[in-house]
Image (tube, rainbow, N blue to C red):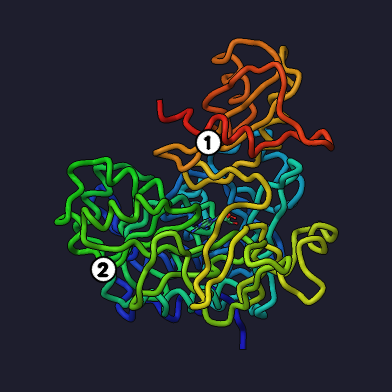
């Protein structure tokens, strides 16, 4: 039997295909029938254009239902979906296109889907095995080179089914979807839960307070990054009543501060359910739906996930094995070998511990990854850009606690220059969320005996920078 993920999802679409899948802000709806027909047209066009199993289809665009028609059509055709962050600059996009060598690059999904109507729709999905590649998700590398995590039909199907069960989704749910769809959180975690339930999504292009507050009146589940929750709490119009119809608030992609968890409970009477995941494995652990959700813990490993702590100490780097863990990085056998243990566990790079009860607690990141507004920023990539600017001898980029973004990107620079002009120059080469919010000029950087910059000391020195 084919294990094409599209077939698993579409078998669960509501029998009455006129039921809504996407509820749009302007009052229109896109039905499950529309979605299915769109996916079949996309697959038909891909087939006619010679795109077959294993071929990559890249997409960089604003969020729309047509992006999902293309995603599903790509799966149906047996090809590989490669979503790119809409904030990437042309120079960044060039790297991904060069590395992944897609046969098709879509930048205007509504037009692309409309043109696909000229081709005969694909009836039967291309047969796929569980191990066959479904999607390529790039995670920026600490050395500046991005790695493509290869996720198979089986990886995505297993995780979707596990989450659908763990979070108790039913056809009566309505999911508030305000996440971007170029990242695993919005594209796989949220979307697959809704599609497996055949339930509607309040489909918002981005997080805007007024739209989210209106959407919560219809929603039963919301998924978000910590920034969504701090923004809701900062809005006095968000009350216990606003949240009353929602049975579940899920949070992840970056650590949820215990203070946010507590403030949310005080305001709404509900406890946010925090879960932990990454591009290479989708979701790994989750707090329980029925049991107690504890602030600061990311909960228990999902069924089938083996989790252990490397290094022989109580706290160390989390290692995992399980049905959703990717097999390898695209065309990077050395990286793949470095990040798996001899007995097949993936070394996540996240530092944490597991308590006697089995709950997992994350304390930090082994590498100095910054997570700003739910997006990963690798300091090295920003440093490489800053170091090229006139007046800069050396830069060290760190994440500093920030009320809205979790962490804000800050550069500590040996040299001199006009801060605003330098930030503007960095913005020409980097997505906005990666560019420093602040540049501090110093005479020297703290270093260890090996000459390495001690970023932990820098983070301490500047930890209150955004409080002012
Ligand atoms: P990405 O591959 O972009 O999804 O980023 C994955 C990284 O986000 C993980 O390796 C963690 O460092 C971090 N992360 C995701 N969820 C959580 C969470 N609930 N708490 C702490 N860190 C998280």
Residues 311 and 108: in front is 311
In the figure, is residue 161 to the left or right of 440? left
Q: Which of marks 2 and 1 is in front?
A: 1
Q: Residue at image x 67%, y 57%?
A: 349
In the figure, is residue 251 to the left or right of 74? left
Residues 214 and 142: in front is 142
| Outermost residue to the bottom | 1
Label 1: how many residues lie within 10 Å, few (<14), some (14-19) or many (20+)?
many
Inter-mark Cα distance, 2 to 1: 33 Å
Q: Residue at image x 28%, y 71%?
A: 173
**Quarter that holds the C terminus:** top left
Quadrant in the rendering for residue 216: bottom left
In the figure, is residue 162 to the left or right of 241? right
Q: Is mark 2 on a helix, strand or loop?
A: loop
Residue 464: percent from the left, percent from the top? Answer: 47, 31
Residue 232: percent from the left, percent from the top? Answer: 28, 46
Q: Residue 400 carries which label?
A: 1
Ligand 1 position by quadrant: bottom right
Q: Residue 247 carries which label?
A: 2
**One can see residue 97 in this view:** no
Q: Residue at image x 50%, y 49%?
A: 109
**Quarter that holds the N terminus:** bottom right
In the figure, is residue 202 to the left or right of 439? left
Which mark is first along the chain, 1 or 2? Answer: 2
**One can see residue 199 in this view:** yes
Q: Residue at image x 33%, y 74%?
A: 17
Residue 276: percent from the left, percent from the top? Answer: 51, 63
Query: Looking at the image, is 460 positioned above or below residue 233?
Result: above
Q: Does the residue labelled 1 lie within 8 Å of ligand 1?
A: no
| Outermost residue to the left | 241
Query: Looking at the image, is 61 positioned above or below residue 285?
Result: above
Label 2: how many residues lie within 10 Å, few (<14), some (14-19) or many (20+)?
few
């Amino acid at each position: 039997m084919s294990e094409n993920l599209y077939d698993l999802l579409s078998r669960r679409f509501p029998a009455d295909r006129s039921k809504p899948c996407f509820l749009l802000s302007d009052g229109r709806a896109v039905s499950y029938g529309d979605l299915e027909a769109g996916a079949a047209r996309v697959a038909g066009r891909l087939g006619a254009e010679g795109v077959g199993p294993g071929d990559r289809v890249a997409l960089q665009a604003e969020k729309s239902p047509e992006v999902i028609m293309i995603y599903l059509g790509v799966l149906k055709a047996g090809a590989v979906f490669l979503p790119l962050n809409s904030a990437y600059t042309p120079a960044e996009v060039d790297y991904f296109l060069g590395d992944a060598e897609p046969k098709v690059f879509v930048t205007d999904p509504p037009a692309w889907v409309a043109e696909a109507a000229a081709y005969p729709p694909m009836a039967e999905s291309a047969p796929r095995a569980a191990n066959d590649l479904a999607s390529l998700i790039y995670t920026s590398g600490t050395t500046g080179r991005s790695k493509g995590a290869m996720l198979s039909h089986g990886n995505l199907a297993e995780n979707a089914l596990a989450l659908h069960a763990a979070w108790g989704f039913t056809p009566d749910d309505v999911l508030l979807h305000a996440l971007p769809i170029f990242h695993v959180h919005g594209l796989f975690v949220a979307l697959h839960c809704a599609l497996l339930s055949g339930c509607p999504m309040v489909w918002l292009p981005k997080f805007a307070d007024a739209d989210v507050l209106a959407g919560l009146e219809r929603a039963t589940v919301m998924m978000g990054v910590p920034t969504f929750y701090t923004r809701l709490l900062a809005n006095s119009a968000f009350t216990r009543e606003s949240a009353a119809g929602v049975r579940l608030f899920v949070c992840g992609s970056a650590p949820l501060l215990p203070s946010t968890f507590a403030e949310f409970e005080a305001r709404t009477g509900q406890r946010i359910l925090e879960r932990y995941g990454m591009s290479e494995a989708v979701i790994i652990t989750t707090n329980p739906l029925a049991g107690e959700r504890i602030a600061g813990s990311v909960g228990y490993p999902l069924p089938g996930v083996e989790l252990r702590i490397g290094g022989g100490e109580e706290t160390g780097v989390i290692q995992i094995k399980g049905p959703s863990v990717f097999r390898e990085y695209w065309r990077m056998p050395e990286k793949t070998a470095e990040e798996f243990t001899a007995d097949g566990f993936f070394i996540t790079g996240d530092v944490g511990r597991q308590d006697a009860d089995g709950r997992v607690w994350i304390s930090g990141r082994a590498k100095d990854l910054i997570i700003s507004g739910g997006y990963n920023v690798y300091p090295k990539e920003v440093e490489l850009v800053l170091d090229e600017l006139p007046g800069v001898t050396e830069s060290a980029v760190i994440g500093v606690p920030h009320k809205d973004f979790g962490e804000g990107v800050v550069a500590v620079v040996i040299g001199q220059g006009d801060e605003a002009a330098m930030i503007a120059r960095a913005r020409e080469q980097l997505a906005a969320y990666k560019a420093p919010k602040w540049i501090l000029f110093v005479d020297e950087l703290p270093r260890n005996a090996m000459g390495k910059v001690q970023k932990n000391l820098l983070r301490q020195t500047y930890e209150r920078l955004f409080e002012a």
